[in-house]
Image: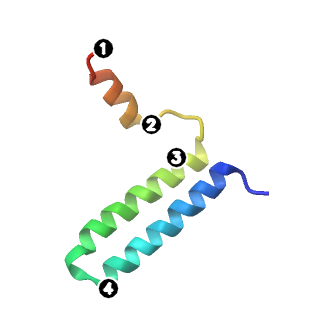
Amino acid sequence: MATNAEMAAMFLRNSAAYLRGVGENNSSVRGEMEANATSYEVMADLVENDPWGESPLAVEQERLSPH
């Protein structure tokens, strides 16, 4: 049985493929769809390879936010 992290990674990769398909069929949003798809794939890798890790972006935002 797949773990929640594995399922999330699969969902993100399938969503990335969908976004790329949208971009292939609509040149006016191709760049945006490719950027989003790439973001989904990066997140899929993070979820799959380090499910309990902290996002570098979240750590940086926390560091910059006033307490």
Which x, y percent locates residue 32? 26, 66
- Which residue is the site of mark 1? 67
Callout 2 crowding tier (Cα within 10 Å): few <14, some 14–19, many ≥20: few
Q: Mark 2: which amino acid?
A: Ser
Picture residue at 63% right of the left edge, 49% below the top:
5
Sequence-first disc among 1 and 3: 3
Sequence-first disc among 1 and 4: 4
- Which residue is the site of mark 3? 46
Measured in 3D between alpha carbons, the distance from the residue under mark 2 to the one under mark 3, in whole angstroms, is: 8 Å
Image position of 38 with respect to 62: above or below? below
Measured in 3D between alpha carbons, the distance from the residue under mark 1 to the one under mark 4, in whole angstroms, is: 46 Å
Which x, y percent locates residue 6? 65, 54
Measured in 3D between alpha carbons, the distance from the residue under mark 1 to the one under mark 3, in whole angstroms, is: 27 Å
Report how many numbered discs are placed on residues in the image: 4
- The tag on residue 25 is 4
Picture residue at 49% right of the left edge, 33% below the top:
54
Q: Could you say which quadrant of the image residue 53 lies in?
A: top right
Specify whether 31 is left or right of 16.
Answer: left
- Which residue is the site of mark 2? 55
